[in-house]
Amino acid sequence: MSERKEQGLKEYPLPEAGSQPPFLYPAYTSTVRRAPQKPLIQLPHTLSELTGPLYGHNPIGETDNDLTRQHAGEPLGERIIVTGRVLDEDGRPIPHTLVELWQCNAAGRYFHNVDDHRAPLDPNFTGAGRTMTDENGAYRFVTIKPGAYPWRNHANAWRPAHIHFSLFGPCFVTRLITQMYFPNDPLMPFDPISQSIPDERARQRLVSRFDLSLTEPEWALGYRFDMVLRGREATPFEGRE
Amino acid sequence: MKPERLCGLPAQTIGPFYHFALTSNAALGCLTRPDAKGERMRVRFRLLDGDDVPVPDGMLEIWQADAAGKYDHPADTQEQAPDPAFCGFGRLATDAEGCCTFDTVRPGRAPDGRGGCQASHLNVSVFARGLLGRLCTRVYFEGDAALAEDPVLRLVPEERRGTLIARRDAAQTGQWNFDIHLQGEQETVFFEI
């Protein structure tokens, strides 16, 4: 057992300063009555934090990673491929981990009874997907480019097009729910949810890259999005005996 | 040469519209099969905002050891096998009253990594619209003699420890209640992990 662990410290170092949004960000008005006000208490990483749910808790279906094939007909909108790898902070792939996503349809409407945006539902599009990364940490989804949609956070507020991602990684510490954005979206500078991330470089990590080599001619555009989860402390370099 | 270390992605809010993707399987509220070992517990959570208004669009996940204190994960090197009739993971959306209820067993005492044991506890992740990232807390259980020696509880100022302790329901045998106050006088203790 490492000395750090015996001292009750963190096996996974805390995120870099500025790389995570604060809980209170008044421009995103829902944070005002929901963000904790007392300081968080530092928790050493015990077995409770260094373990976590590992396997898909629902079986993965054949069309779960292709959101364009989940209904009898084809959904409307711009077909896209979203692919990449799930990595730790040392760049090591995280194999066989569950990746879940959800999004609105091409018109900007979610398959959800609370969403009252006056845009049509698409009977051929639900907008939920799930897959496991392969042995190289790679995942791939086929979907429809989500639309922008208005929300009531402030006057004339619009969310930039985004896809929600949910990942577990190897343990309780690495759990992450985030959103992927698209390159050069003019709405992003006006969006308090993405702007809540203090560090501009960290914010840019949530923007996927258009990649011509991922496109399928006559079929779909391709976007690359690698997802880095918190990693263990870098192991010191060990020279050869 | 040391390669440049990557940086973990920022979290973003789960938003209000996740249900059809994440919580459509209500079975994730039940962690046990009938033959699971251990004392049955029904844990009812209530999620409240700074005005004590129920949060109707939150999502709670729990992760816990089985009745013998074993996590179903390779990092848990205790000798015994995990209970095959038990799943340590649960996930539910809160309802209009801000509530959700998990059916589980009392977790066994897991090692604390320093030669001792932790008191029985659930590890909880809280997600909601208005939460830009995940909040982490723990649920301990009223009346547990091990509370006094739990190394994590000892890190919490004494006057706030009560926010981490589920209480027996006065009417429903086997039910435990745990309110999560996101803010205010009774703000629940949240951990930075």
Image (cartoon, coloured by chain):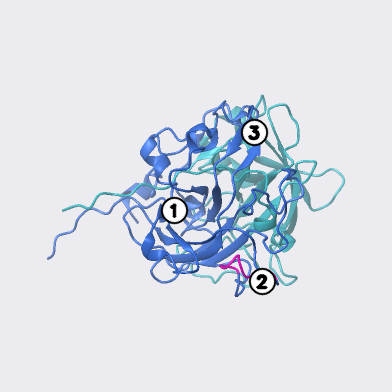
Q: What residue did someone put label 3 on?
A: B182
User: Quarter holding the N terminus of chain A?
Assistant: bottom left
Residue B51 sits in quarter? top right
**Chain drawn blue in the picture:** A
Q: What residue did someone put label 1 on?
A: B115
Q: Colour of chain B?
A: cyan
Q: Where in the figure is residue B33, as x and y percent of width and height? A: 72, 69
Whether the magenta-drawn stretch holds residue A198 is answered as: no
Residue sticking out furthest to the front:
A218
User: Which element type, helix, strand or loop, lies under badge 1?
Assistant: loop
**What type is the residue that disc 2 sits on?**
Ala
- Decide whether the magenta segment is chiefly helix, strand or loop: loop
Q: Chain of mark 3?
A: B
- Label 2 packing within 10 angstroms: few (<14), some (14-19), many (20+): few
First in sequence: mark 2 or mark 1? 2
At 64% from the left and 48% from the top, the residue drawn is A108
Marks 3/2: CA–CA distance: 34 Å
Q: Nearer the viewer, residue A184 or A237?
A: A184
